[in-house]
Image (cartoon, rainbow, N blue to C red):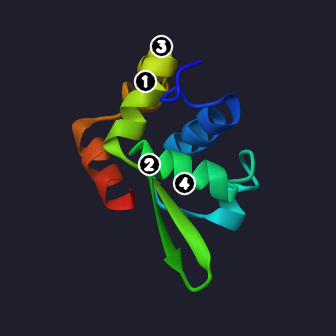
Amino acid sequence: MTTDAPSRAERTILFALMAHAKPIRNPDLSQISPEMKKERRDRLNDLGLVESVLVKRTYVHTLTDAGWAKVVETAPGHADFVRRLVFDGLTPAQVEALKDVF
């Protein structure tokens, strides 16, 4: 494993952030993925895969574009599967409406 390769726990965190598709508070993230401990947060931030901002004594995490690309690289079929599952059945108007939600 190279130093730039996320660990299994870190990859799971990246997948959870991708699935959530919007900023998420650390306590909420910990309910759907391994805990975002300081060393994981620092490492994912240093790799540019996640942005973490301290808001009222808790961190809020966002998957960066580089983080999204890493998830797609890690599981190339996953993005296509999500597109087929979620988006292929929607009309263009429905896809536009989703932009307001996310």
Left or right placement of residue 44 versus residue 84 in this view: right
Residue contact between numbered discs 1 and 3, judged by CB atoms under 8 Å: no
Residue contact between numbered discs 2 and 4, judged by CB atoms under 8 Å: yes
| Amino acid at pointer 4 | Asp
Which type of secondary structure does the marked residue at label 1 adopt?
Answer: helix
Q: Assess disc 2: are there few (<14), some (14-19) or many (≥20) residues with their C-alpha within 10 Å of its C-alpha.
A: few
For disc 3, the marked residue is 77
Residue contact between numbered discs 1 and 2, judged by CB atoms under 8 Å: no
Q: Nearer the viewer, mark 3 or mark 4?
A: 4
| Amino acid at pointer 2 | Asp
Residue 93 sits above or below residue 51 on the image: above
Residue name at image x 62 percent, y 83 percent: 57
Q: Any mark on residue 72, and which?
A: 1
- Picture coordinates of residue 38, whole percent (x, y): 65, 59
For disc 4, the marked residue is 42
For disc 2, the marked residue is 46
Which type of secondary structure does the marked residue at label 3 adopt?
Answer: helix
Extreme residue toward the bottom, this view: 56
- Picture coordinates of residue 85, whole percent (x, y): 49, 25
Tell me the distance, in whole angstroms, between the alpha carbons under discs 3 and 2.
26 Å
Query: Who comes first in sequence, dot 1 or dot 2?
Result: 2
